[in-house]
Amino acid sequence: MTTEDKTLEQKEEKIEHAKLADALSERYLAYAMSTIVSRSLPDVRDGLKPVHRRLLFAMRHLKLDPNSGFKKCARVVGDVIGKYHPHGDTAVYDAMVRLAQDFAVRYPLVEGQGNFGNIDGDSAAAMRYTEARLTEMAMSLMDGLDEGAVDFAPTYDGSEEEPVVMPAAFPNLLANGSSGIAVGMATNIPSHNVGELCDALNYLIKHPDCECARLMDFVQGPDFPTGGLLMESHATIVKAYEKGRGALRVRAKWEKEDLSHGQYQIVITEIPYGVQKSDLIAKIAKMLGDKKLPMLADIRDESAEEIRVVLEPKNRTVEANYLMEYLFQHTDLQTTFHLNMNVLDADSTPKVMSIKQVLQAFLAHRMVVLTRCSQHRLDKILHRMEVLKGFLITYLNLDRVIEIIRGEDEPKPLLMKEFNLSDVQVEAILNMKLRSLRKLEEMQIKTEYDTLDAERQGLEDLLAQEPLRWQKIAEQVAEIKKRFGQKTKLGARKTVIADAPTAVEVPIEAMIEKEPITVVLSKKGWIRALKGHVDVSEAKFKEGDALQFAIKAQTTDRILFFSTGGRFYTVMGDKIVGGRGFGEPIRLSFDLPENETIVAMFVYNADEKLLVASHKGKGFVVAAKDVVAQTKAGKIILNVADDDKAAFCLPVTGDMVAIIGQNRKLLLFKTDEIPTMTRGAGVILQKYQGAAVSDIEFFNEQEGMPFAFGNGTRIERDLIGWIGKRAQVGKIPPVGFPRSNKFK
């Protein structure tokens, strides 16, 4: 066998045979877990992702504490990617920039110097131009790293060590929140007020079995860096935090500023978290340019250090609440924060937690940190006390000790044997500098020893008694609240908790500039809107066409149309084509069937009641608000038979109704005899044999029945002969009644 064959055989021995699906599944799972654990989800204990943890650790190594000078961000990024983070410099710098932006994180962990971007979405300057150092909050996250508080693990190349988790003196996960998208899962945690979290932690320490709802009495809800208004009820907030999932609405904060002559302007002072101010203004400006905001005249950005976006209404009659409600519905002045508290627990397992579980995990971590720090300190004390005992023996036998050290080649074994010293004590004596001998006074040694002994006793009691440790943790939490709580400038609550918004329906009329129009509909179905309230007697129509209806209205009015098919159609006045030319076919405004025509056109009045009736005399009363159609297809109200059609629609304006048929029979009866319905075929109004309705009119019995007489109007007051019950035949009308069988 040749050397080449042997090499090939060895390679074949290393090859593992597996199904492609299994191999892909295994490797994809490994990739997914790597993404989840190492990139996307924060640790519940310190609220940090690996990149953030490495950033802070690298800055600590560079001694960038709050009291030191700033250093170039490029230096920090270089250390991070060189020692700890095997990723691109851009990702690391972006993470660092975010930690320094007070509009992105509630409690910045990095203090930046230079251009670190702004709320308008402008990017930070290049890392070679910016400088940074740690904040007090960041230092408190790492307090205990030198005291054995947490485990360290090798870096990606094994050349360095990095902390697995930060000691975290405050609940950073909830304080600063977190967001990220992993493989098959995501997290989105808002920031909260540290003072409120501390109150909840202290209560949880005393009442470990309490409900989430009780903790929410202390934690009001999110406290976003950009402020705003949280528009949710307390019950909704509690439910979201109990499940670890939920939707929370956030609105911009605004105020009305009065100007001279009754004018005013709206000033937006806070915007929802995560919204870029420039994009928000650009969107509103575009809506303004597209004439989708008729109530708004102008928008200006007068922001300096504080946000100040000015909205100028069209005129002083515009309702500020209506304008803002419309903007809340159609712009990012109102957003929804989708809460998803998906985090890694202490075992690096992804889990959606409630607020109680998050706080419990933090307290459990603090218990571990306290135990480890106490044990670390105790070990150091015991070591020092052992050394001090050796120093005391040295002081009492100084001459002999010096003699042994000078005279013996191997003084260590002799010292240990003669003075009964431990290895630690002898090493300390041998490594002691000569100039220290003058300090070896008995009283000083005993004083230090007694002090350490008292501390030792305290630490041993602490480690032995769990209640003492919880008391210590409570004191630490209280200290954090004192440093960063609500009474400090940094800790004052920014987001106002408001009630859930009431359903404010913005009338569509409010979104339209009000102008007088005259709506004209021809017999062949051509419609137009003439500007102003004008005389239509000289209006021009196409050859063979003529006027059918003309009504005076406003652009803000709803115009109702009633067809022979018993359907109502609704068109806004501003949507009707202008008065130039002959207009446009009515069928372009709504879906009117070819075999149907319009029999009535009028302005919508919500307070009115309408009588709808068919050609054969069946009908009912319906409220005007029930006939408004929301679609082009219209709304069927009056059901008519195949051999019948809708013919009348008129407002109910009196206590009596007069109806006359083609057979010239007149019937009068009480209006309340007609039933009120929302839809149907109706009831018989007047009985006919081979005839149909000619006209219908309402009047008040006390005033008499009016009808056209010559060029004027006649009032018939003696009505006894024609008054009957609904569905009767009726009698011949009074002398002088028009031969057209029409009341007008």
Image (cartoon, grey):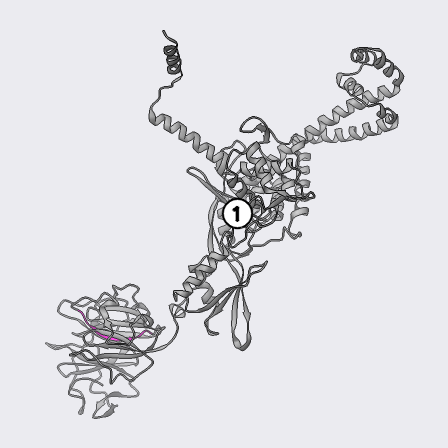
User: Residue 113, relative to residue 673: is it above or below?
Assistant: above
Provide residue 642's location: percent of width, then percent of height. Answer: 14, 67
Q: Is residue 401 left or right of residue 491?
A: right
Q: Is residue 110 left or right of residue 503?
A: right
What span is in magenta? 596-604
Please report the residue visible at 52 percent of the width from the left and 35 percent of the height from the top: 345
Provide residue 699's location: percent of width, then percent of height. Answer: 28, 83
For disc 1, the marked residue is 190
Q: In the displayed orientation, state which residue is furthest to the top.
A: 1
Where disc 1 sits, the SS reads loop
Quadrant location of the C terminus in the rendered image: bottom left
User: Residue 711, relative to residue 594: is it above or below?
Assistant: below
Please tell me whether residue 599 belongs to the stretch shown in magenta.
yes
Number of labels in the image equals 1
Q: Nearer the viewer, residue 77 or 499?
A: 77
Q: Is residue 570 left or right of residue 188?
A: left
Provide residue 591's location: percent of width, then percent of height. Answer: 23, 65
